[in-house]
Image (spheres, grey):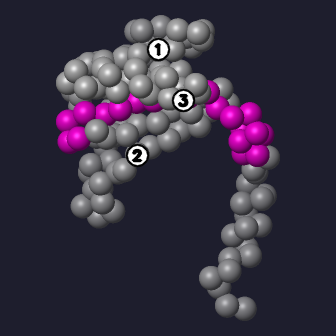
């Protein structure tokens, strides 16, 4: 378990976009966490624990369909300001990472609309004409 604490430290050093890292068990217990010191925190510790609890609940729900589509490998949710990643470490622990979001990427996705998606679906390359 001490290796996990060191891992979070290395994570912060290796990528300046990483804002926060945590390791939890599937019961929701926050085992280790590391927050970058040179940034303003977006959430209080209590809010962070609530968010992690919600994420764990979502992760567990994926196990209900695991037999049909396989084990989840990771999950990424992108917001305007941050990106959140959930990655299984083993069968009992999850790694949570919060990163600054790349402004260019956010702008690209802001331009996606239902009309654009519908146009893509109408031009389905798998359909023969």
Q: Look at mark 1 in the image and give the residue it sits on.
A: 35
Q: How many labels sit on residues?
A: 3
Task: Check residue 15 in the rendering and tell me which mark sits there, or answer none.
Answer: 3
Residue at the limit of the structure toward the bottom, as seen here: 129
Q: Residue at x 77, y 59 (%)?
A: 116
Q: Nearer the viewer, residue 63 or 19?
A: 19
Q: Earlier in the sequence, mark 1 or mark 3?
A: 3
Judge from the rendering whether residue 1 lies leftward or rightward of residue 34; answer left or right: left
Helix, strand or loop status at disc 1: strand
Mark 2–mark 1 Cα distance, whole angstroms, equals 21 Å
Answer whether residue 111 is magenta in the image: no
What residue is at 28 percent from the left and 39 percent from the top?
Answer: 89
Residue at 59 percent of width and 27 percent of height: 17
Q: Position of residue 41 (x, y in %)?
A: 55, 10
Seen at 56% across and 33% down, the residue is 83
- Please say if 86 is above or below 54: below
For label 2, the crowd category at 10 Å Cα-Cα, with few meaning under 14, some 14 to 19 and many 20 or more, is few
Residue 18, position in %: x, y?
53, 26
Query: Which numbered disc, 2 or 1, marks the residue closer to the eye?
Result: 1
Q: Is the residue under label 1 in contact with that under label 2 (CB below 8 Å)? A: no
Q: Would you say residue 56 is visible in this rendering?
A: yes
Q: Is residue 81 left or right of residue 43?
A: right
Choose top left, top right, bottom left or bottom right for residue 129. bottom right
Of labels 1 and 3, the one closer to you: 3
Q: Earlier in the sequence, mark 3 or mark 2?
A: 3
Q: Is residue 23 above or below residue 69?
A: above
Does the image show residue 53? no
Q: Mark 2 highlights which residue?
A: 74
19 shown above or below 102: above
């Amino acid at each position: 378990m001490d290796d996990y604490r060191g891992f979070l430290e290395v994570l912060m050093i290796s990528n300046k976009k990483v804002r926060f890292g945590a390791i939890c068990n599937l019961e929701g217990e926050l085992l280790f966490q590391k927050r970058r010191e040179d940034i303003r925190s977006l959430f209080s510790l209590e809010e962070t624990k609530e968010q992690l609890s919600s994420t764990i609940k979502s992760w567990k729900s994926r196990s209900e369909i695991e037999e049909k589509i396989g084990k989840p490998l990771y999950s990424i949710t992108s917001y305007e300001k941050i990106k959140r990643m959930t990655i299984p470490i083993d069968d009992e622990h999850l790694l949570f990472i919060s990163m600054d979001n790349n402004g260019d990427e956010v702008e690209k996705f802001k331009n996606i609309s239902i009309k654009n998606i519908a146009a893509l679906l109408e031009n389905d390359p798998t359909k023969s004409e």
